[in-house]
Image (cartoon, grey):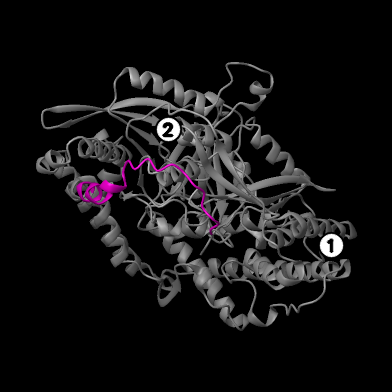
Amino acid sequence: MKKFLVLIAFWVISFPGLTSSPEGLKDFAHKQSQVQLASEIIEKLESNHLVKKDYESIRKEAFDLYLERLDPNKTVFILSELPEINKDSFNKNLISKDLKVAFSLFNLYADRYYSRYNLQIDFLESVEEGDLRSSRKIKRTLSDNERTSNLEELETLWKDLIINDLIQLMLSGNDLDESISKTTKRLNNQLNYFEQTRVEDVFNIFVNSITSIYGPHTSYMSPKNSEDFDINMSLSLEGIGALLSSDGLYTSISSLVPGGPAEKTEQLKPEDKIIGVGQDDDGEIVDVIGWRIDDVVDLIRGPKGSKVRLQIIPTNAISDSETEEIEIVRNVVKLEDQAAEKKILPIQRGQKNYKVGVIALPAFYFDFEAYQKRDYNYKSSSKDVKRLLKELKKENIDGLVIDLRNNGGGSLYEANALAHLFLGRGTTVQVKNSNGNIQGLGERWGYQFYDKPIVILVNKFSASASEILAGAIQDYDRGLVVGTSTFGKGTVQKVDLLSSGQIKYTESKFYRVSGSSTQNLGVEPDINLPTLFNIDELGESSLDRALDHDSIPGTTVKNFNRVSNFKDILRKLSLDRVEESPLFKSIKARKQWQSENKSEFLDLNLDKRIEQKNSIEKFLLANENNLRGSLNLPTYESYKDFMDREDDPESLDIESEILGEAANILIDLVELKKEPLMAMNQK
């Protein structure tokens, strides 16, 4: 199932829909002021959004999305209850009619929610071990289900979901009574939060179903959410430094704020699923599966210096029974926490020792407030990188790796300024606005500050400004792009005030100097490197209704002709090393095992699930011990010993292994350019 991005902001953030405020759930009805606000939002999008769509053409799709957001796992509505939405000319009476239908559906949803709750609570009071040894199965991804045609089938599914929850808890070490107690508490907590739904919440869900048809980065923010957004963007909110998203069941990490508390732990990764939240050292872990995302946010937020504990299912976990607990000290991100950093990696080739400079850039930052005050010492990524380059040049490095992994972007003008440190002058990116006007950004004059070989290291979480820099370096044939395909966010958003709240919408689109958009496809690396993640399930293309990739005419640029003639041999040299790397072999084995043992269904049979869990643990232990044995490290006698391990040695750091391979690719290029035949013979 594709996730919907909740709201772009700097900290943990909330879904612009359900919020907490006690007010009964019966007979919800929209207000006249909401009709006027919805009309204002629609008019704003039709006039200003990059994608030209009128409301008449998207009404059915908006209702489909509204139903998906209310009932993502198809556990509430049956087929006969889906509304018939016919094409009609847009007017205020039409949006009033649509709001009436949307609120009517929510009232049905509320009634059905109580029915499900009561049935599941009753079932839990009578469940026995024999119920956990059924021959039935459910789909691993519930959203892939066909919607049921009658209530009897729906009620059977409700019971099956409880059986699966009990089995999952028992696989995590609980007995049946503990599992029943925890599941009952989970249902009661979810009901408690659900009962606090307000009229405004229903409106927000529906109107954001309309805005999201225009793309995942377009959303309406109520006055409360607008306030949170402004606080987030000013970096004054205290929290863990993470962007969250939801698939209706799990709240997941969408991205980490560079320099934030979560990123600094080096334990939390994008796409990790949050299943529990605890406070301080010994606070109870509260189960948050199925919670609204804003309520998860409320648990994670807290004052600077306090601790929060997150129970997660890691993104690379083979089974949902693989869980970890991570402790994070809440803090405020400061600009200096995002600063570029440098180091030198020594690479030995035969009798020759090389120095590879590395600049890690977590974000394209710019202290606009200090700049406006004419503070000469204002912070900016391009200024910092230039300073670090001066220092590295004094060290006489042989080449440079710019590490843009997990860099989600930032200032477009900083990306442009950075590109010119390596290109000198010329267009770096083209921008097309909602009127169809195309403008090239770049410098007519300039000089190359750094002329030696460069490698741009990227991954699936390198986005926006990172893609502009990587794309320009690649299109000018100035250096190599290494890693995985990038995120694919090639759009620019604008926030406008409304009579109530704000609207964030896409106003323009990025294009490389080649004419190809970075949207959806991102930047494809010249040399691919292994990754822990399944990148096909990540990035812009995984977001619902992401804008399409397209192209415009390219611009004339200088061809540096630095790397294109060497790409084939560089790929082969890198592949040879990757295939010999114990860490990369371990990743490949894990992915292969997961692919071969992946099932579309979950057995509702405890014995079978225990057998499957044991099989997973046996493989994971064997794979880990094979890796450790090849590195002459002590192995583990049991899976428990493996899970209870302390910090792993640096030799098992896959991120460092990837950086090391990027450095080796750079030296391959250096040697090939100097003495290609000699370099070939040495391999």
Helix, strand or loop at label 1? It is loop
Image position of 405 (left or right of 430): left
Magenta residues?
551-574
Q: Is residue 82 left or right of residue 467?
A: right
Q: Quadrant of residue 246?
A: bottom right
Q: Position of residue 485 (x, y in %)?
A: 41, 52
Which of the two discs, 2 and 1, labels the residue nearer the N terminus?
1
Image position, residue 673 (x, y; %)? 23, 38
Kind of residue at badge 2 = Phe
- Between the C-alphas of marks 2 and 1, the distance is 57 Å
- The residue under the point 74% across, 60% down is 207
Task: Residue under label 2, please give it.
Answer: 422
Instruction: Say which quarter of the image contains residue 155.
Output: bottom right
**In this rendering, is residue 589 above or below 418?**
below
**Is 315 on the left or on the right of 379, as rendered?**
left
Question: Residue 640 placed where, x, y %?
Answer: 28, 47
Question: What kind of residue is marked 1?
Answer: His
Q: Is residue 570 above or below residue 594?
A: above
How many neighbours does mark 2 have within 10 angstroms: few (below 14), some (14-19), or many (20 or more)? many
Q: Secondary structure at mark 2?
A: helix
The numbered dot on residue 30 is: 1
Q: Residue at x 80, y 76 (%)?
A: 88
Q: Is residue 500 magenta?
A: no
Q: Quadrant of the C terminus?
A: top left
User: Can residue 285 be seen at all in this image of the molecule?
Assistant: no
Front residue (pair 13, 27)? 13
- The one nearer the camera, 630 or 428, is 428
Report if residue 89 is visible in the image. yes
